[in-house]
Amino acid sequence: MTLVNVVPEGARISALVDINPHKQGRFAPSTGTPVVGRESLRGRPAVDHCDEPCPGGE
C-alpha cells in the first residue's frame, strides 16, 4: 500500500493484490485503491510487477 502512496505513477495502479482475505474487498488508505485477491487477476492482461524490492529501486 505504501507503493501507491509514494511512487509518482501510483495513481495509475488500478488495484493491489493481497493474499490476506481480511484485506480483500477494502481500500488502501488515502488513495482509495481497491485491494483484491489473486483470483481477480485471471483473464487480465499481464503487467510488470515486483513482489520484492526491485533491483536498483529505492
Image (cartoon, helix red, strand yellow):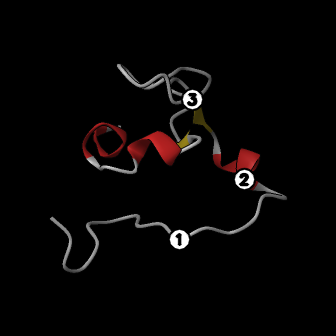
Spot occupied by residue 6 in the image (x, y as percentages of width and height): 25, 43
Q: Quadrant of residue 35?
A: top right
Spot occupied by residue 28 in the image (x, y as percentages of width and height): 43, 26
Residue 18 falls left or right of residue 31: right
Tell me whether the residue at label 1 lies in contact with that at label 2, contact meaning CB atoms closer than 8 angstroms: no
Which mark is first along the chain, 2 or 3? 3
Q: Which mark is residue 41?
A: 2
- Residue reaching furthest to the bottom: 55
3D distance between C-alphas at marks 1 and 3: 18 Å
Spot occupied by residue 25 in the image (x, y as percentages of width and height): 62, 23
Q: Which mark is residue 39?
A: none
Residue occupying the point 45% across, 40% down: 11
Q: Is residue 22 above or below residue 51?
A: above
The N terminus, quarter of image: top left
Amino acid type at mark 3:
Pro
Residue at image mark 3: 34
Residue at image mark 1: 48
Task: From the viewer's side, name the closer residue of 13 and 8.
Answer: 8
Residue 43 falls left or right of residue 5: right
Amino acid type at mark 2:
Leu
Q: Is residue 16 above or below residue 45?
A: above
